[in-house]
Image: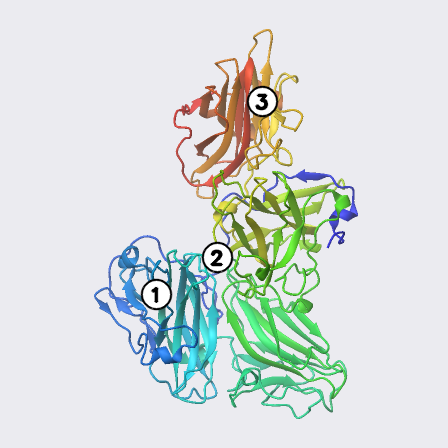
Amino acid sequence: MKGAGNLLAATVVVVLVSSLVVGKAGEETPSQDKNSTFPVRFPNFSHSVPKKKVEPRGKRQTEGIAPGICDFGSAGASTWCSWSSPGPDAASRVENEGAPEAWTLSTGINSLWVGGPFNDTTGDDRGGYAFHETSSTPSKLAPLAVMESEMQGPTGPNGKCLKFWYFLDGLSASELRVKVRKRGEGKAVTIWKTNDLTRGDWREAQALYTFTDNHTIMVEAVPAGAGDPFNIFRGHIAVDDLGTRPGQECIGLCSFEGGMCDWNNVRTDDFDWMLGRGTQNPITGPPRDRSSSQGEALGGAYVFLDSSFPRRPGDVGRLESIEFQATDPNNPPCMRFYTYMAGRGVGRLRVLLEDVVTRKQQIMWALQGHQGTRWVQGQLPLSSGTPFKVVFEGTVGKPRLGDIALDDITIVSGPCATLPPAAMPPASGDCTFEEDTCGWSNPGTNQRVDNLQFLRVRAAEFAFPTTDHSTGSRQGFYMKLESPARKQEGDHAWLLSPIMQGDGQAKCLSFWYLMFEPLGEVEPNLGSLSAFMLREGSSGALILTPVWTLHNFQGLTWFFAQTPLRAEGDFQVVIEAVWGASNSSGMLAIDDISVFDGNCRTVPEAAVVRAGDCTFTRGSCGWTNLTSDRDFTWTLASAVRRPLNMHDHTYGAPAGYIYFDVFNLGGRTQRLQLVSPVVEPMPDRSPLCFTFWFAGFGADPNTSLSIYLRPSQLRSFPEQLLTDLSSDIRVWSHILGDPVGWIFGQVQLLASTRFQVVFEGVSFNGGFTLDDFKVYAGTCTKRPRDSSLSFSHS
């Protein structure tokens, strides 16, 4: 992958750390228009329940609940409705899983006692739900839990829509899956599953299925297995509001066995998509629909474009959805489908997103030519800030030599990387790393921006993580930071995206990450994982803008991340992984990258980058010197010039922090100021917390370090700032004590307008070092506790 084309190769490399930030500190993303009149929306796949306790009430008394849906009652009145657990003869119906266990009926008031979420889907801690505790004990492995419906009759061609809300939390929660089982048989067919944790939220799900016989529905909660080292840790899987409705209520989903569902032929194209059960042309296929081709079922249908007479090359057939409301920018759904494109004359299939207001169409997915005699899965994120339609557009290649078929359209929670890779729009940035790196590459060695590589590896090659994220299997691939036998603190690698085109509109970068470090005898220092935007400035220099960053151990599993991107012109995304301790045996890895339209919020909140954040690894991040004496300034440490041979706090490297060191033979005290970039207040004027690390040294016992809050409108002339400090408010100060190495500091910042943070060092023989500045939203108490907190004017 070395030497791939990118912006680094287009100009002389001058890497700058920009003081620009993407969005304002704490900026909220716009919500959907609650007054929208469009009748159809995607399910609310992400639903944060209220954290506060609500008044007890009869569940759904005021809201009502659809017939056939079970809300599992409430405290003192729990009910299984028509479900049972584990169900009659369930042990014989679960393949290779051992004897199943029952789900547990519970409420939020019991969550700390026996497990389960703190609230049901209404936010009521007295509302009922069903859950399964997934943690094992040293003497007993947690079993699978099975919940089974009453006997269901044949679904009919329109199918049934299974609706429910689900919650996965904890290290031992492995998978939730739903199966359909024919009466009198042990074998079951999986119709829905997930292994992603829901990050403290209830998620809504729906699954459309058809079945020609009497059957039951089985909901299975799967704990971590015997070989999983995390099976002893707490976890739970819960479901609520579970039941079946008519198939037409699964909005946007279609198996085409009862017709076109919510999809219609466009009147202005050349010809129509048609329903079928099996091809009449053995040259191009398919012999049967996707679901029945996977087993012994006889039922099934699909839609296809017939390329026979009177079709001509280039004829177009379009199949469009009903109108949907704008998607949630923080959780756009993922659309999946299957296509059959076999034959020497196959043309092209595209998926378009059409704005129903402007009628502009955006190509989201495109595949051309012969794809083999098999059903190929396609998927793409659906993200739109306005009401939209989805359009499948098929184009004829050579008549009679290339029909195109489509089947099993589903919509699931959360963004996804576009599949297959060949169908991605140019330079989309999406990648699951299952086939290749999709245009993501390591920089060339001659560009000298890193000294290690990201490696594409198979999960089976390492003991941990046990699976990749994309496939959830040992055979899946992901990208990890190279870990040579001999490495130094701060050794790092870049992973560069393809060059993308920015139009000034917000985009969202999402990915899954793993930051794991085994427990050891030494102080943990795994390193960091960060995302940057790389673009060329007007002078030809490259500007590197941080947009997301986390440090050190984050957990024992794959976690979801996202951050907004906004740029004009060409840019690249840079994923950077940095080793901390030279003896670290941890793992820094990423998987399932997706870039889609929308102004999303940063996840997790700890990864938000604000003005003032700085590790001083690549400069001062917009922090500037203000001093009246050029002989004494705040200076970036280097391997050959640093006080007391101190190593930086971030990675333990010999450089990467800032300091001042005053030695004045005349005994004249020096005052040195380090001023932050302009920091935006929170939209609701709530507090910010500023954290940092510092260390003092020297013979002057009065050597001090203070922090001031400065209104940003005074930032006109540096010489004025040193003489007129009447508006500066001192919020923190510390007098030199016995040297003890790096000390953690923090102080709460209250401001209603834009402001700057000012460090002021005072000494005639001594100094201070500073590192790892971070601005967080929220309140905090002063650290160290013995530091002065006076709120006095300078």
Q: Image quarter for residue 4?
A: bottom right
Q: Which mark is drawn over residue 132?
A: 1
Evaluate if marks 1 and 3 touch, with contact meaning CB atoms under 8 Å apart: no
User: Which residue is tagged 3?
Assistant: 644
**Height in image: 165 above or below 256?**
above
User: Which residue is tagged 2?
Assistant: 31
Classify mark 2: helix, strand or loop. loop
Q: Decide which of 14, 721 is in the foreground and name it.
A: 14
Q: Whole-percent x and y of residue 393?
A: 66, 76
**Height in image: 353 above or below 198?**
below
Q: Is residue 30 visible?
A: yes
Q: Earlier in the sequence, mark 3 or mark 2?
A: 2
Q: CA distance from mark 2 to mark 1?
A: 34 Å
Q: Which mark is drawn over residue 405?
A: none
Q: Whole-percent x and y of residue 407?
A: 58, 80
Q: Residue at x 53, y 61 (%)?
A: 467
- The total of numbered circles placed on residues is 3
Q: Nearer the viewer, mark 2 or mark 1?
A: 1
The three-letter code of the residue at mark 1 reads: His
286 on left or right of 608? right
Q: Decide which of 184, 756 is in the foreground and name it.
A: 184
Quarter that holds the N terminus: bottom right
